[in-house]
């Protein structure tokens, strides 16, 4: 994997591991146009894992074109994060396991309506494994110091 930006590889990995925010995934739609979707993600051994319903348009898009872009960055200052490019592979047999891990990672109460709805369709979940090929970090913390009003 190629890496650039101000952070070391370890700093980028630490950021990814600690970021419990949605991953923005950029794909090509069936007409070749760009589309960005937000998904929960799970870092595991250098890959980013997500899950979605097998009938989701995203599955069709990634089946047609597995190359994708992604970004992990919070919407609040200080602005910093990682973005990159990679390839997505689909794993229908791992959908349930990844979804359960995502619910835990994002602290979703298993008794909540959201969890019950997601868990009611486990047989339709597909895991998505994104293998980063290029990663860029950015960190505007120092230039923003003192610029944000309390």
Image: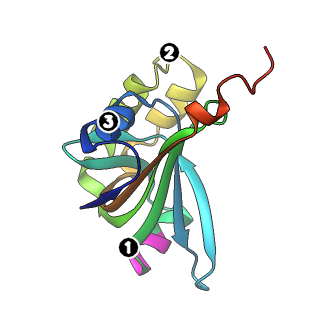
Q: Residue, x 33% and y 47% (percent of image)?
A: 49
Give the quadrant of residue 91. bottom left
Magenta span: chief secondary structure: helix
State how far apart marks 2 and 1 are (Cα): 35 Å
Residue 15 in picture, x, y percent from top left: 38, 34
- Give the residue number, with chain letter if any, for mark 3: 11
- Quadrant location, the C terminus: top right
Q: Residue, x 38% and y 23% (percent of image)?
A: 104
Q: Is residue 49 left or right of residue 118?
A: left
Residue 29 or residue 115, whichever sits in front: 29
Asked whether the viewer can see residue 91, the reply is: no
Numbered disc in front, either 1 or 3? 3
Residue 55 in picture, x, y percent from top left: 50, 62
- Give the residue number, with chain letter if any, for mark 2: 111
Task: Give the residues drawn in magenta, as a range.
Answer: 60-64
Residue 105 or residue 126, whichever sits in front: 105
State how far apart marks 3 and 2 are (Cα): 35 Å
The answer to which of marks 2 and 1 sits earlier in the sequence is 1
Task: Look at the numbered disc 3 and give the secondary structure of its residue.
Answer: helix
Q: Is residue 22 left or right of residue 31?
A: left
């Amino acid at each position: 994997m190629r890496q650039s930006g101000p952070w070391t590889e370890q700093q980028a990995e630490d950021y990814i591991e600690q970021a419990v925010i949605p991953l923005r995934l950029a794909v090509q739609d069936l007409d070749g146009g760009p589309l960005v979707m937000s998904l929960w993600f799970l870092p595991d051994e250098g890959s980013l894992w997500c899950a979605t319903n097998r009938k989701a348009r995203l599955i069709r898009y990634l089946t047609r074109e597995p190359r994708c872009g992604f970004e992990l960055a919070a919407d609040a200052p200080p602005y910093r994060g990682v973005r990159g490019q990679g390839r997505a592979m689909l794993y229908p047999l791992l959908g349930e396991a990844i979804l359960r891990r995502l619910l835990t990672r994002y602290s979703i109460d298993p008794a909540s309506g959201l969890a019950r709805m997601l868990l009611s369709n486990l047989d339709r979940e597909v895991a998505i494994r994104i293998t980063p090929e290029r990663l860029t970090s950015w960190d505007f913390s120092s230039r923003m110091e003192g610029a944000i009003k309390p």
